[in-house]
Amino acid sequence: MQLSSLLQRFNEPETLKMAKLGRELRANGFDITDLSLGEPDFDTPEHIKAAAKKAIDDNYSHYTPVAGYLDLREAVCTKLKRDNNLDYTPDQIVVSTGAKQSIANTVMSIVDKGDEVIIPTPYWVSYSEIVRMAGGEVNMVTTSIDNDYKITAAELEAAITEKTKLFMFSSPCNPSGAVYSKEELRALAEVFKKHPNVFIMSDEIYEFINYEGSHQSIAQFDFLKDRVIIINGLSKGYAMTGWRLGYIAAHATIAKACEKIQGQITSGANAVTQRAAITALTGDMKPTAMMLAEFTKRRKRVMELLTKIPGLVCSEPQGAFYVFPQVNSFFGKADGEHKIENADDLCMYLLNSAHVSTVTGRAFGEPNCIRISFANSVENIEKGFAKIKEALATLK
């Protein structure tokens, strides 16, 4: 069969690949400890589920507006003002079937063939592949563990060329857990001020999983706001991964472009999910605070466990629910049967020998690292790290 050449431009997400391999091994009777999870292990809060049940009873079973129900877009505006002190109007909001679609809409509405997109590494796996699908060229800027994997103003300035159209980043960051301070964002904003043709996509999906205090958005700088596209959603902060709802907040021209693109792909997001989302965005935030408290405990335990494994080098995450240790000290080692040449090999070794699922850092643009999630119970985290420690000790 002759299929589209588009399929050759991008790869399958490594996160989904590892999850699939783990499920296959589990189905064959192996006790797999999943530390590759990219979702909270909590159930959706009761008041949000109740809103969804009411929406079904109220017959929200019809097509929805492409950009989302007006009262949901108003709720997004209320949330942005309440939590971020940012002023948006409903015509600047587009609701999508997950934040991933929001990102795809954004890239497709901005990037033409040959345009450059700057992505600091490490980055969420789909950024680069979505850019390639749109025909853009990825300009990766390698950051340093010494700066907690955050791009500096000088590095940004050096990366921008006349072909640069878009800058994509996340804070808190998946996979590193890095969080940009207001001062760090201001320094980046001053660079962008000198380059008025560059758009900024700010992925803030992990906003509420922040161990450093209040979240800071680069959209807070008025001189830059019209070029910033905020990406957010309900998956991480409200434990609503399967509900599939994300949104953008952007200049009305960009929002209208995203709406036009979405109208030809999925149209409006799920009606019941949208009704539940209004309750999530405007309702009780105690469940979110409880999740953060639990993730804080897990982060502390994970860092304790990491320090007991020789050869792993890791900075403490400031947000999200991952650690991103450097593992290159194990490259070239073997257990007598398996030789580890790179992070991919190490992840497969841990999966097949230790029965622990992780994700290679290569997928995130950092080939010397692996991503380990602590979106799992403390019991499973301790069990997984014990198996990792034992497996790594056999490599000589």
Image (cartoon, rainbow, N blue to C red):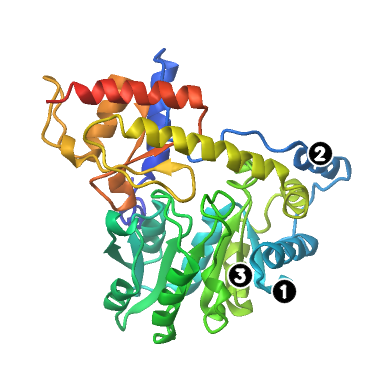
**Dots 3, 2 in contact, CB < 8 A:** no
| Crowd rating for badge 2 (residues with CA inside 10 Å; few <14, some 14–19, many 20+) | few
Locate residue 107 relative to residue 214 in the image: left or right. Answer: left
Q: Residue at x 41, y 16 (%)?
A: 31
Outermost residue on the top side: it is: 29
Locate residue 272 relative to residue 123 in the image: left or right. Answer: right
Q: Tell me how far mark 2 sits from mark 1, CA to CA.
A: 28 Å
Among the 4 quarters of the image, the one containing residue 337 = top left
Q: Where residue 345 appears, x then y in whole percent?
A: 22, 34
Residue that numbered label 3 is attached to:
260
Residue 136 visible here: no
Q: Earlier in the sequence, mark 2 or mark 1?
A: 2
Q: Secondary structure at mark 1?
A: loop
Quick check: 316 above or below 281? above
Q: Tell me how far mark 1 sits from mark 3, CA to CA.
A: 18 Å
Residue that numbered label 2 is attached to:
50
Locate residue 22 relative to residue 287 in the image: left or right. Answer: left
Residue 181 visible here: yes
Task: Tell me the amino acid under the disc marked 3.
Answer: Lys
Task: Tell me the amino acid under the disc marked 2.
Answer: Ala
Q: Earlier in the sequence, mark 1 or mark 3?
A: 1
